[in-house]
Amino acid sequence: MSVRFDDFEEFFALSHDGHSPFRWQTRLARQLCETGRWPDRIAAPTGAGKSSVVDIHLFANALHAAGAGSRVPRRLSVVVNRRGLVDQHALHARALSELLRTADDGSLYARIADALRSLRIGDDDEPFELAMLRGGLPRDRRWLDDPGSCTIICATPDMWGSRLLMRGYGSSRYAHPREAGLLAHDSAVIVDEAHLNRQLLLTAQRVGEFAQRTAGRIGVAALQAVETTATPATPGSDGVTPADIDAEPVLARRLRTPKPVRWQGLPTWTGKAPSARYLDDLAGLVNTQHTRYGHGTSGGRTIGCVINRVDTAVRLAALLRRQGLRVEVRVGRMRPYDLDRLLAEKPGLLTATGDATTDVLIATQTVEVGVDIDLAAMVTELAPGSALAQRAGRVNRTGRSTVTEIVVVGPADPAKLGDVPPYRGDDLSAAYEWVQRRAEDPEGCAPLAITVDPAPSPKPSRTLWQRLELHDAHLLARTSDELFAQPDLELWLRDDLEPERAMAGVVVRADLPADSNTALALLHVVPPADIEAFPCTLTDANALITQVRAAPQRRRVFIWREDHLVDDPESRLRPGDIVVIDDCHPVHTEGVVVENPSSRARPVPAESLPGIHAIILDGELLTEFAEQTDEQSASTAEERWGKRQFVPGPMDPNSVRPRLSWIVVRETARGSDDEIQQEWTGTAVTLDRHSEAVAARAATVGRRVGVAEPLPEVLQLAGRCHDLGKEKDWFQRLLGRHPDEPVLAKSRRRTEYQARRARATSGMPSGWRHEQQSVLATVHELDRAAVTDTAMRDMVLRLVGLSHGRGRAGFPHSAAELLGGGTDPVARALFDTGEWDSLIERTHTVWGIWGACYLEALLRAADSRCSQEGS
């Protein structure tokens, strides 16, 4: 497992087609490996390779694991405000994971993979964890289950920032503390093009300040916030220097090769819904560039066309195809399933290598940041100056061509420029003036020329930035309370407060039964998955809902929010919601959800959904299983499908013979639902065994991530006590324990029907939580063990009570209700007179609000992994 810093150049070259890192990239890697800290700011012109932060993060963690580098943050979040670019970062990270996982024994990549695996607390084969957090994707929990693993998180600002603030869009509220704790500690965030995300950067820095106050006591570093930009507005940035450019011919060619600019005013330009004449004008410009610079010319490549509106992009694509050009559309809102198919068919399309079968790539703002494509030339609509500079960075990116051109399209009379959503008139006017200067300069939009004459950034759409205060943090920490009004996160997250920018997702299903109640039951078992979700704005999602409800058939709409289906189908959509509809409705045009879509979507096959082996809808098989007992059904399922979980649906209400409506065969995979794990693992697990397993794992997790003493012991005590409340008779009846068996923590294998029946007959009070009972039992355990240190006792009790995300900051039952009518002075003090609330506030003071979340995340990760492993 020997890894040295001198290996960085070879490691980098292996994943970049043999290209060595630039000097500034090596310098950044050395700084991180030696100091354990990222710089506050990274400045590098477009084309200089800022996306290498992913490679640097992985190498620095491997070097530390091999004992040759400083302790560095385990988690790196790359945050960018373009959904397509989140996908691009994730694709690069996924490619690195594949290279590491399949490396030949003894090679450098194999040694780095082994070093990264040594950081993991589990026995996973993946060298590092990868998570995507963007609008339109259901939640990804896997990165929460191993706090010690090296992790790459690719996210949009809203999705990352809402999790940092303990209100993650699209995630379960009981997972909110885990997410916030792991993002605020042992983490770094790279805010790409920070001038477009000033509010988010300010909030990240503020949370880092709060976390830093108690980071020394916890023993794990607080969040490091890094801003990156291609056009630094302030001096003192780490990154590319003039000496780097002079010393490196490849970098100099990228940054100095001219990119001539031409302004093209069009009388047909409005910036709004396009006319047929405007589309003809655009098509003429694209065809001219294709003839001059595209395929068929010496060294010609794909021509780029960047459009501000999705509907304009898809209509232009259709027109160019009719004219004989081979066109691909990339507008950032593609379904991952469709994107995977596109990349399989054209793997070079979105890379610097290019694709010889594509004449024109039509895109929206998705190509502005982070996409390493190398276009021969470009036609782009007028946009704010900083957006145009980024678009220009995709043209002749490697500097390998001596001829190119960037045509900027706008109105014939720029003096009449006004607001053109999503852009404002004054930003467009400033951009027009900048374009005129660039058009007069032979260097045009060469990256170095832009650093001398920076593109104007959009003016802030809000007059004041919102600073997160301590009282705000205390309110946000009440994650399990039913607040009258939820905090408005946009104040702390967004530069632009326009509501239509918020994102949702759309999922199309072909296997939903005609009976809506039966369809709801199936969606509970097979919830929406990231691979099948079309990302779209809330505005477009609402328009689609209106269209579906006016359709002649299957007018139903299901809304998936956080981890459940919304009871009220008329509920107003929120950011991160997933809209589920039947496959009989038009939903997209060119793979994108737009107003008045023209095409139905091909549903993702059930076997392609994560964790799903099959959805059985065969009538004879459903009848066969319906006529068996529960035990016979489970036995038959095991014979057919092995040890997978067998989930029968309700009886088909439209069948004359007894017949199930559906059967789902699924894996009991890592990252499955928290609530299921509390009751079902496939085999019966005794409480003693589970408690000792979690205690040992929690202590191991604490020591492996490096928390300070006595926290490993605190985590161990909390792990041993966290499920003591399960000894209660009604919970044991729920688990199906026989009187002569030991006390259980998890039930034996059961069908979902058996589990529901056991819950209904257990006698458990509505809303009762075993964690509250566990707190009371833990007080007595701590007394017997003579644990007197107040801070230690408080944190053990907090971790036990909040071990599943509830209890923040109170529990629903009084002492008498908790004890079934009995009395206990400790229970009365804790739950009737406010001592539990006081304990929560004391732990916030001692360990910090985000620090306490981090410690909760460590215990919950240990519990989750033990449950997944069946212990």
Image (cartoon, grey):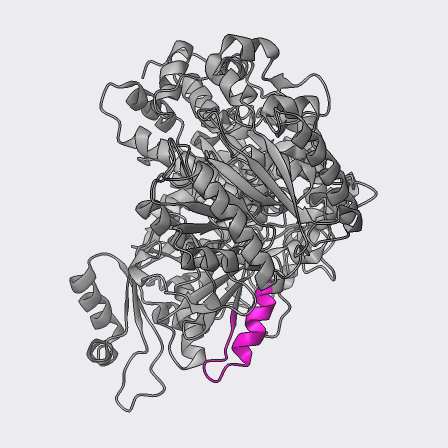
Residue at 70% across / 28% down in the picture?
A: 454
- The C terminus - image quarter: top left
The answer to whether residue 593 is above or below residue 183 is below
The answer to whether residue 175 is above or below residue 354 is below
Query: In the current view of this chain or complex, which residue is farthest to the left?
Result: 639
The residue nearer to you, when weighing 847 against 823, is 847
Q: Is residue 544 magenta?
A: yes
Residue at 59% across / 50% down in the picture?
A: 168
The answer to whether residue 490 is above or below residue 785 is below
Can residue 35 be seen at all in this image of the molecule?
A: yes
The residue nearer to you, when weighing 593 against 505, is 593
- Image quadrant in which you'd find residue 729: bottom left
Q: Position of residue 522 (x, y in %)?
A: 39, 70
Can residue 798 be seen at all in this image of the molecule?
A: no
The residue nearer to you, when weighing 653 against 856, is 653
Residue at 37% across / 77% down in the picture?
A: 513
Query: In the current view of this chain or complex, which residue is farthest to the bottom?
Result: 656
Number of callouts: 0
The residue nearer to you, when weighing 680 against 741, is 680
Q: Position of residue 219 (x, y in %)?
A: 58, 24
- The N terminus - image quarter: top left
Q: Position of residue 50 (x, y in %)?
A: 53, 26
- Image quadrant in which you'd find residue 678: bottom left
Does 191 sit left or right of 48 as displayed?
right
Q: Position of residue 86 (x, y in %)?
A: 51, 42
The answer to whether residue 260 is above or below residue 80 is above
Residue at 26% across / 73% down in the picture?
A: 630
Does 557 sit left or right of 647 as displayed?
right
Q: Is residue 538 magenta?
A: no
- The range drawn in magenta is 540-558
